[in-house]
Image (cartoon, helix red, strand yellow):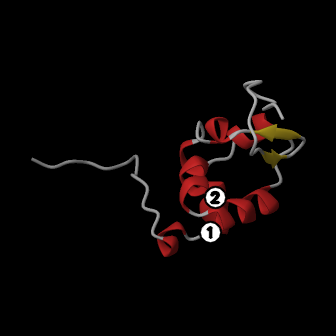
């Protein structure tokens, strides 16, 4: 089958809304790509709860949306924070 986003042929595709998406396109979303690579069950749970309509909605999923549903630290997923101030 072909990926809806990149049009490349792939045997294993994930259904995201109405689109079939390959793992390379899923990994373009930094947080969801990391969850997909390390915890596939959590990834599938998030897709069921967030229900993106298509790949474009999938790419709009924010970190806040994910953290409302899942405690990432519980699964050992540590993300860099954006508001870190380094002191000299």
Marks 2 and 1 sit apart, C-alpha to C-alpha, by 6 Å
Locate residue 7 relative to residue 88 in the image: left or right.
Answer: right
| Residue found at the far left of this picture | 88
Q: Nearer the viewer, residue 56 or 3?
A: 3
Q: Residues within 10 Å of mark 2 (few under 14, many from 20)?
A: some
- In the rendering, at what x and y percent does residue 20 appear? 82, 40
Locate residue 68 relative to residue 11 in the image: left or right.
Answer: left
Using the rendered view, name the quadrant where residue 53 is placed: top right
| Residue found at the far bottom of this picture | 74
The numbered disc on residue 70 is 1
Q: Are marks 2 and 1 in contact (CB under 8 Å)?
A: yes
Q: As displayed, is residue 59 above or below residue 80?
A: above
Q: Secondary structure at mark 1?
A: loop
- In the rendering, at what x and y percent does residue 37 appear? 56, 54
Q: Residue at x 82, y 47 (%)?
A: 15
- In the rendering, at what x and y percent does residue 34 appear? 53, 52
Locate residue 14 relative to residue 63 in the image: left or right.
Answer: right
Residue that carries the numbered disc 2 in the rendered image: 66
- In the rendering, at what x and y percent does residue 4 appear? 81, 30
Q: Residue at x 76, y 57 (%)?
A: 47
Q: Nearer the viewer, residue 7 or 72?
A: 7
Q: Quadrant of the N terminus?
A: top right
């Amino acid at each position: 089958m072909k990926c809806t986003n990149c049009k490349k042929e792939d045997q294993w595709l994930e259904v995201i809304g109405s689109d079939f998406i390959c793992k390379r396109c899923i990994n373009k979303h930094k947080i969801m790509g990391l969850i997909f690579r390390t915890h596939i069950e959590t990834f599938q749970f998030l897709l069921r709860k967030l229900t993106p309509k298509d790949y474009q909605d999938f790419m709009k999923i924010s970190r806040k949306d994910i953290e409302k549903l899942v405690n990432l630290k519980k699964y050992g997923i540590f993300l860099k924070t954006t508001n870190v101030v380094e002191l000299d």
